[in-house]
Image (cartoon, coloured by chain):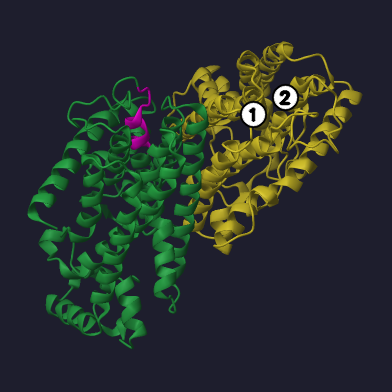
Chain colours: A green, B yellow
Amino acid sequence: MANQSQAAVERAIATRRERVNQALPEELPDTEPERLYEATRYLLEAGGKRLRPTTVLLVAESLSGVDVDPETVDYRAFPPGDGEIDIMRAAISVEVIQSFTLIHDDIMDDDDLRRGVPAVHREYDLSTAILAGDTLYSKAFEAMADTGAEPDRAIRAVGELASTCTKICEGQSLDIDFESRDAVTPDEYLEMVELKTAVLYAASASIPARLMGEPEAARSLYGYGLDVGRAFQIQDDLLDLTTPSEKLGKQRGSDLVEGKQTLVTLHARQQGVDVDGLVDTDSVEEVDEEEIEAAVDRLRESGSIEFARETAQGLVESGKANLEVLPDNEAHDRLDDIADYLIEREY
Amino acid sequence: MANQSQAAVERAIATRRERVNQALPEELPDTEPERLYEATRYLLEAGGKRLRPTTVLLVAESLSGVDVDPETVDYRAFPPGDGEIDIMRAAISVEVIQSFTLIHDDIMDDDDLRRGVPAVHREYDLSTAILAGDTLYSKAFEAMADTGAEPDRAIRAVGELASTCTKICEGQSLDIDFESRDAVTPDEYLEMVELKTAVLYAASASIPARLMGEPEAARSLYGYGLDVGRAFQIQDDLLDLTTPSEKLGKQRGSDLVEGKQTLVTLHARQQGVDVDGLVDTDSVEEVDEEEIEAAVDRLRESGSIEFARETAQGLVESGKANLEVLPDNEAHDRLDDIADYLIEREY
């Protein structure tokens, strides 16, 4: 990816993230019960790249056929001109679903930190975290049912959001199961990632097309999201191994320490590497950097890092091919760039 | 309530419960991941009166204007004749929401038993219970978005289901807050019950009217559900005090032992009764029946039991008045009877 494209995509994301952040309080008002609603906003306010809502906005922009100024366009009456779809509300709906899944996942995984702050069940308590997630869940459906899109299109968008949530739960269930299984194959892992992570990217790409009455484009765009969503997760796994801790914001190699299965370790296991023996330490606090370095070298020798990188690269290419249904315009280019960006980012 | 009406309402509920139970496996298929889907079905299969889905079916029957045979009518192509609404799917949607809330509530309340079997987080584990609830949540929206009703009606039904779920979460949050507060007023209690319990009755009564294109009837029916739903909860609280343990299926007076706030105890507190001192025991296992008997006598003397009974009775009357929007037919009569039944039932 050329430096110029990288700068353009980072700007494209930053501008839309800012718009999403401005709109979020309007969709999650500060009402009673105070502590509950504070907890629903807590993780959303802690940060996040907003890649999914940005995808919603970019697809809608591209399908509108006109180049819009993302800093000033009215996303609540879309497409520009005589459009009446509140596409911002749809964008926030998927971000809110993402936030709900993170809050509940952190409980299930017993994780203490998220986005550099305590997880919701640590900052508040278990009940509040369960309930904050449940509230975000219904808020997302309230939002998606109220975009002002034509009812036949709106009901399909809601149906797609619902089936997406079901798949996310299935993916999380598989992920938990994998922890107690040795013989997970790379294909099983990719299926889990598809369900747990990629389907929400897929919905983010297809739902704006549904709302705008382009069901055929929606199908291709779903494919785009499915591929780049999987590539995104593989890149996340790679970054854990290859990015210095300072840059990563957490201990490098923590997945290895915690024995998490990733495409890299599953490939290595198939190559006969003793993955469980790579790192002796079993606490992230006591990690020996040299031990991690040696483990990563071993995974490089077995071709496992290269295998994961190539898999992600292949997914990005097949994902981008699905963008052909979009008009040739700037938003289309940025969706193309985002796919590359997801596997080239360093944190 | 005459014995004859009571028999008719019990038969009406039993027949429709049977139909709902037959249809449930079709909406919650037995698929992968096996353990997750087993957990989603576990509580639903353990029993339940199915009052909410029965309300959905009865409202649809009444609005159809024809008397149907509930044992044989095709609820999946409603109204009979040329209707195309899968009203059974809408009925199951609200029951599935009810089941999700029970699973998550039992985690938050740290309850061990539900419907005479271990709570889902006890039978399985915390993660599976959270995830089973989350899966039921999306399944309910998948179902409600796919009834075949006209899209403009369907999208309103989905929106109403979503805002109902938000209110249920708010109600549960208030209920948790109340546990650590002394000065809860009866009005605050009734507001909590409205959100936590009654709104799902209200949605069960109004959603079929929305799906069938009767928005004005929907508003009245919502009022019906809101009133009888609150009456239902007050009756539940009364039964805990007045029904023998064998009949109740759990220790009589357990709410008193656990210090739960109810309309009865809140009224008594306002009358100057030392509610916290009524029962010394603080474990349901060590309850002294005579102590419970004396406590109930004290609550009777303060007029608190009568106050709760009259409040429930008043709600049932105002609720029934809202049924006037329905045609005069058998299903209408049964909805009328159900309101009475809810406060006359003995368990």
What is the quadrant of the C terminus of chain A in the image? bottom left
Name the residue that disc number 1 marks.
B204
At which x and y percent is residue A79? 32, 27
Name the residue that disc number 2 marks.
B59
Regarding residue B110, the answer to whether it shows in the image is no
In the image: residue A231, left or right of residue B90: left
Residue drawn at the location 37% of the way across and 41% of the way down: A94
Local SS, label 2: helix
> Which chain letter matches label 1?
B
Check if mark 2's residue and mark 1's residue have beta carbons within 8 Å: yes
Disc on res. A201 = none
- The amino acid pointed to by label 1 is Ser
Number of marks in the image?
2
For the record, the magenta segment spans A83-93
In the image: residue A183, left or right of residue B143: left
The answer for how far apart the CA atoms under marks 2 and 1 are is 9 Å
- The amino acid pointed to by label 2 is Val
Q: Is residue B13 above or below residue B191?
A: below
Q: Earlier in the sequence, mark 2 or mark 1?
A: 2
